[in-house]
Image (spheres, helix red, strand yellow):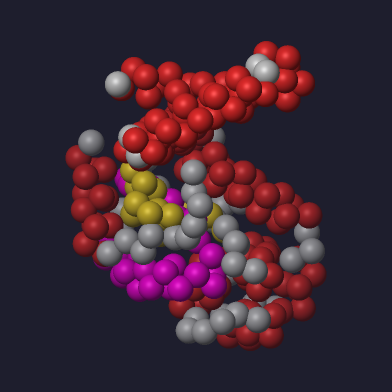
Amino acid sequence: MRHFAAVMLALIGLMASIPSAFAADALSPAQKAEVKNMVREYILENPSIISEAITALQANEEKTKVDKRSKAMVSRRQEILNPAEGTIIGNPKGDVTVVEFFDYNCGYCKQMFQSMAELLKEDTKMRLVLKEYPILGQSSITASRAALASRKQGKYTEFHLALLGYKGALSDSVIMTIAGNVGIDTKKLQDDMKDAAITEILVKNHSLADELGVDGTPQVIVEGEFLPGAVPKAELVGAIAKARKS
């Protein structure tokens, strides 16, 4: 029975992949109707094959995702751990690297912010690589462009912490107010935000996220271990301790 189910599913896939002109030549209308009825009757008698097929499809998709991620971790390792844009805070020579994809408007990123800020103070050997990954609208893009532009004034760390720690939705005026509060020349910042190099960084980060299978924020990576969502502080500490032992 299982073999017949496999044959039926294979037949369905084969029929779907055959160009309509070829299918018309291969099967007569009566034969097509007969095959459709056979498949329909079998599925009605054995509905579990649908969940089996879905499970197999999900497993295959997960394997593809893991394989793609593994290749990216190798081929883009330098970009992941030592980005040319220098968006690294904490100890630049730390013994454990934590990578975070985030969006300044992401509620879960803000939720995890306090834990991450505490860890940076408590763990002097922690190295945090920040991946600007704006996916929640125009104000998120503006915030990331402003944060990246602030590097020219040596204010990236302070501005990043202030933006992510802000309670509420961001807007252009709010972003500039926060910038001014941390000592940034906002006129120069607005000019620097137009730099095409910033666009290149954001495009590159989105490409990297795609290859790593990052489909939301926050996404934390601790020495190759992926921890999706707002990770509790205890879990972050545990992952860092595990990385130090390996």
Asked if residue 170 is positioned above or below residue 229 in the image, the reply reads: below
Q: Is residue 40 left or right of residue 112?
A: right
Look at the image and say whether residue 107 sits in the magenta stretch: yes
Image quadrant holding the C terminus, namely top left
Q: Residue at x 61, y 49 (%)?
A: 206
Q: Position of residue 21 (x, y in %)?
A: 77, 21
Q: Position of residue 96 (x, y in %)?
A: 33, 47
Q: Residue at x 21, y 53 (%)?
A: 238
Residue furthest toward the top?
A: 26
The one nearer the camera, 64 or 13, is 13
Q: Residue at x 27, y 64 (%)?
A: 232
Magenta part of the protein: which range?
Answer: 94-123
Query: Does any portion of residue 161 appear in the rendered image?
Result: no
Q: Is residue 222 left or right of residue 40?
A: left
Asked if residue 123 is positioned above or below residue 108 in the image, the reply reads: above
Q: Position of residue 123 (x, y in %)?
A: 28, 60
Q: Is residue 87 left or right of residue 222?
A: right
Q: How many marks?
A: 0
Residue furthest toward the front?
A: 30
The one nearer the camera, 156 or 64, is 64
The one nearer the camera, 76 or 244, is 76
The one nearer the camera, 61 or 91, is 61
